[in-house]
Amino acid sequence: MRQRIPTVLLALGLAALLAAGCQSEAEVAPETVPGSVLPANFPAPVYDLNQNPPTKQGFELGRTLFYDPRLSRDGTISCGSCHQQFAAFSHAGHGLSHGIDELLGTRNAPALQNLRWQRNFLWDGGSNHLETMPIAPLTDAVEMDETLENVVRKLNADASYAQRFAVVFNTKPIDSYQLLKALAQFTAALTSANSRYDHYARHESGGTMSAGELRGLRLLTQKCTPCHGTELFTDNSYRNNGLDRAFAADSGRARITQLPADRGKFKVPSLRNVARTAPYMHDGRFQTLEQVLDHYDHGVQPSATIDPQLQTGTTLGIPLSSQEKTDLLAFLQTLTDEQFLTDKRLSEKP
């Protein structure tokens, strides 16, 4: 899910997708649909479940679709091919993910987690709604290279899918709106909020942190916010973090806005589960977190759109001592949510 989406598709049936439901989030049993209960330390989500009230059958249908390679043109690539649970639904070890016909994309597959708290998706914000986001990878020529029309045709030809969709939506035949809503019931459930840090923040058992980890937390607050602020550890903004001096290969956010001021800006990723989502940056150029910290310490490159947080006078970057790097790395490990990474309800074969 790394390419931008054509504007015309972004607008596709959005009004119809937003049909209001009547079931509150509190009415959904947490053991039935993951992510139905809001974490106490999280802000209010952007995507309200009242828009698409989750049910056990709807969530499980979305999970089946997420892992079904028949959603691609030749039946070889599923959403789960490039978004693996053990890597926080990123593509482990792949700087640039491989799509259909072994084609290589131009960006790193971002982690899929806490999507309900995002207003825009993809590295350049090319999708602006959780329910229409899947259209981008489904129709991208390098990723799944399929059309919504063909996907719906294949689903309607499958008796099992026809029955399951009818149970969830109480109408036939299957259409693209049902497809996208079912997928959204699964992606909306991808909530990561049970790391050791979360237990610490909520004063729960199991939330003990070491002196080094606490120093790392203070450093993060002092030196890495607002970019990696809030309990989501991202402000969901688009920033030029000094990777390059020019952006001929990928202009980032400017591909969507066409504004020169947005050249070289990419979405700030969350730090949650960051120890499991290597490689890093929009093009996967860094293999380790140590390399990432070294970049901010002494690798930031100047350009016209460099983020003000990374330039003080003529000084670029965020100076970090060896001890500070050690403490930051220790804290980042506390953001790993093993429950989320191993929850069988989110896996291909629960």
Image (cartoon, rainbow, N blue to C red):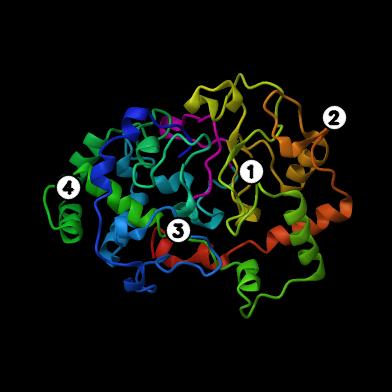
Question: Of helix, strand and loop, which one carries label 3?
Answer: loop
Which span is picked out in magenta?
A: 94-112
Question: Of helix, strand and loop, which one carries label 4?
Answer: loop
Magenta: predominant secondary structure element?
loop
Q: Is residue 247 visible?
A: yes
Where 131 falls versus 231 (above or below)? above
**Type of amino acid under label 1:** Pro
**Which labelled disc corresponds to residue 279?**
1
**Type of amino acid under label 3:** Leu
**Type of amino acid under label 4:** Ile
The residue at 64%/61% (across/down) is 335
Tag in front: 1 or 4: 4
Q: CA distance from mark 3 to mark 1?
A: 21 Å
- Circle 4 sits on which residue? 174
Tag in front: 3 or 1: 3
Judge by depth and name the residue closer to the eye, 91 or 207.
Answer: 207
Q: Earlier in the sequence, mark 3 or mark 2?
A: 3
Displayed quadrant of residue 285: top right
Report x, y in % for residue 207.
Answer: 66, 75
Report x, y in % for residue 296.
Answer: 77, 40
